[in-house]
C-alpha cells in the first residue's frame, strides 16, 4: 500500500467545498438542528453537543468544519464508544469492552479448539462486566465447567450481544440522518476527488485514477472508499480524511464494509508498506522463467501493531493473489536489469549528456516507472518495480 501525498491537495479548493457557504456544511447544520428538535438518543445528542455546538449550545459551522477536516478521524470513534460506555453502561472504563468485543468474538469463532475459544472470550468477558451482555450464554461461559456445553457450539457464542444493542443501532441511525452521504455526494464527489490529486489507487498500486471533463462536468474514474465504514460510523461519512480515492476492485469487491477500526489496516494518509512489506522473488529457474514471487513483510508477524495492519491489508486486498497476474512484468524487469549493466548506463549518460537529468531519471524511463520511494504513488506498479529492482541489487543512484 502507498501513502497518499497530502501535500498535493488543493487545500484552497477543498476549503471552498467545506466552507460555510457550501452545501455540505449548510445541510449538516440543518440536519443537526432538525435532529435535536426531534427525539435523538441521549448519547447522540450529547455527542452532537460536544462536537458541533458552541458554549451556549448553538450549532457552530466552524466546529462542523473542524470536525470534517480533522486529520485523525479515528479519535471521534473512540469518543463515540466512550460516550456509549458512559451513558448506557454507567462508566467510561467499559469503553475497551465495547470496542473490542466484536473483534474478540470473531477471533473466538475462528478457532476450533474449545479451550482456546474459552481463553479468548474470557480475556474480555469477566465477572465485573458481565452485566453488559444480554444473553444468558455469557453467564454460562464464565460459570460452566463443562467446555462442551458452550465453547463447542458456535451458535451460542454468536448470540452473545450487548444489552443495549438496539439503542446502539439507534445512535447509528441518528448520525446517518445527520450525515447523509448519499444525498450530498453527487454535489461534491467528482470535484473533491479531482482536487485531491490522487492518481493511482493507494490500496493496490495497480489502477490509474483519472480526472477529466465531459460536457463541462468534472468526472473521475475513482471510487470514494470510507476507510472507516460509513454504515458503522456514519458521523465520519463526510469527513475528508476518511475518504480514500481507490479503484472499484479494492473498494467494492475486496474491502466492502469491513471494520478497519476494530481490525486495523494501513491508513494511507499516515502509513505505507515501505520497506516493512516488500515484493521478493522467491525463486526463478532462469533469467526469463520466474516460478513465483511474493509480497510479504520482511519481519515476522507477531503482535506488533504495525505488523497486524500490514498483514490485514495484504489479506483484505488480496495483494499476493492479484499480483500473480504481473509475472510477465517482473520478467521484463529482470531481463532489463541483466541487459543494462551499470557500466552501460554510465556510458549512456555520457553519450546522451543533457537528455537525462540523472541516472534515476534514465532508469525510470527504462523501466517505465518512478523509482524514488516518495513517488511510488504516481504510477501503477511503482512499488513492485522498486522492490524487484532492490531485490536484484540494482542501484538507482
Image (cartoon, helix red, strand yellow):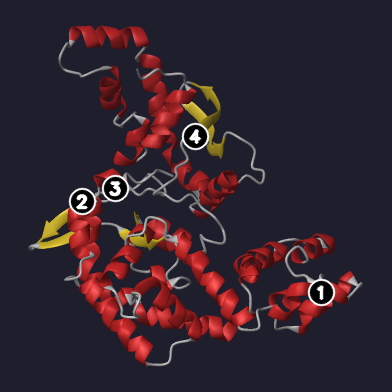
Residue 66: % across, % down: 32, 63
- Label 2, residues with CA under 10 Å away: few <14, some 14-19, many ≥20: some
Please give left or right for residue 13 compared with residue 97 in the image.
Answer: left
Whether residue 159 is visible here, answered yes or no, is no
For the view shown, which residue lies furthest in the front direction? 56
Q: Secondary structure at mark 1?
A: helix
Mark 2 or mark 3: name the one nearer the start of the chain: 2
Q: Which mark is residue 141?
A: 1
Q: Secondary structure at mark 3?
A: loop
Gap between marks 3 and 1, in whole Å?
A: 50 Å
Mark 1 or mark 4: name the one nearer the start of the chain: 1
- Nearest the viewer among 318 and 50 is 50
Looking at the rendering, in which quadrant would you find the C terminus?
top left
Gap between marks 2 and 4, in whole Å?
A: 32 Å
* Residue depicted at 45% across the width and 70% down the height: 233
Residue 186: % across, % down: 23, 71
Please give left or right for residue 327 compared with residue 147 in the image.
Answer: left
* Residue depicted at 16% across the width and 54% down the height: 212
* Residue depicted at 40% across the width and 57% down the height: 249
Which quadrant of the figure has residue 213?
bottom left
* Residue depicted at 35% across the width and 49% down the height: 201
Q: Which residue is mark 4?
A: 279
Please give left or right for residue 99 compared with residue 209 in the image.
Answer: right
Residue 173: % across, % down: 44, 82
Q: Which residue is mark 3?
A: 208
Q: Which residue is mark 2?
A: 10
Q: Secondary structure at mark 2?
A: loop
Q: Secondary structure at mark 4?
A: strand
- Label 1, residues with CA under 10 Å away: few <14, some 14-19, many ≥20: many
Residue 141 sits above or below residue 264 on the image: below
Amino acid at each position: 500500500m502507498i501513502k497518499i501525498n497530502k501535500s498535493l491537495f488543493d487545500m484552497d479548493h477543498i476549503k471552498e467545498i467545506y466552507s460555510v457557504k457550501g452545501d455540505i456544511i449548510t445541510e449538516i447544520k440543518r440536519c443537526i438542528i432538525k435532529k435535536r428538535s426531534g427525539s435523538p438518543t441521549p448519547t447522540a445528542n450529547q455527542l452532537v453537543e460536544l462536537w458541533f455546538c458552541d458554549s451556549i449550545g448553538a450549532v457552530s459551522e466552524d466546529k462542523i468544519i473542524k470536525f470534517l477536516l480533522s486529520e485523525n478521524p479515528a479519535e471521534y470513534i473512540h469518543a463515540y464508544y466512550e460516550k456509549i460506555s458512559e451513558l448506557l453502561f454507567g462508566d467510561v472504563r467499559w469503553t475497551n469492552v465495547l470496542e473490542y468485543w466484536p473483534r474478540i468474538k470473531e477471533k473466538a469463532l475462528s478457532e476450533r479448539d474449545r479451550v482456546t475459544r474459552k481463553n479468548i472470550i474470557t480475556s474480555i468477558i469477566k465477572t465485573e462486566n458481565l452485566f453488559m451482555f444480554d444473553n444468558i450464554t455469557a453467564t454460562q461461559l464464565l460459570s460452566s465447567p463443562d467446555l462442551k456445553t458452550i465453547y463447542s457450539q458456535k451458535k451460542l457464542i454468536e448470540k452473545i450481544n450487548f444489552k443495549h444493542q438496539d439503542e446502539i443501532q439507534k445512535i447509528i441511525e441518528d448520525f446517518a440522518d445527520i450525515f447523509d452521504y448519499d444525498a450530498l455526494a453527487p454535489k461534491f464527489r467528482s470535484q473533491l476527488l479531482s482536487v485531491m490529486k490522487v492518481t493511482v489507487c493507494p490500496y493496490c498500486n495497480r489502477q490509474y485514477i483519472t480526472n477529466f471533463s465531459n460536457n463541462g462536468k468534472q468526472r473521475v474514474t475513482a471510487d470514494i472508499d470510507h476507510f472507516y465504514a460509513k454504515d458503522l460510523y456514519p458521523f465520519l461519512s463526510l469527513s475528508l480524511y476518511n475518504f480514500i480515492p481507490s479503484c472499484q476492485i479494492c473498494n467494492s469487491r475486496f474491502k466492502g464494509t469491513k471494520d478497519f477500526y476494530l481490525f486495523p489496516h494501513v491508513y494511507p494518509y499516515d502509513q505505507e508498506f515501505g520497506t516493512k512489506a516488500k515484493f521478493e522473488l522467491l525463486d526463478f529457474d532462469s533469467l526469463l522463467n520466474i516460478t513465483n514471487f511474493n509480497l510479504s513483510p520482511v519481519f515476522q508477524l507477531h503482535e506488533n501493531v504495525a505488523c497486524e495492519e500490514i498483514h490485514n491489508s495484504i489479506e483484505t486486498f488480496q495483494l499476493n493473489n492479484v499480483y500473480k497476474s504481473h509475472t510477465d512484468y517482473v520478467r521484463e524487469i529482470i531481463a532489463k536489469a541483466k541487459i543494462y549493466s551499470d557500466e552501460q548506463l554510465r556510458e549512456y549518460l555520457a553519450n546522451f549528456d543533457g537528455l537525462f537529468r540523472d541516472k534515476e531519471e534514465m532508469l525510470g524511463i527504462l523501466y517505465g516507472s518512478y523509482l524514488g520511494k516518495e513517488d511510488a504513488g504516481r504510477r501503477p506498479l511503482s512499488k513492485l518495480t522498486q522492490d524487484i529492482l532492490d531485490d536484484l541489487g540494482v542501484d538507482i543512484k
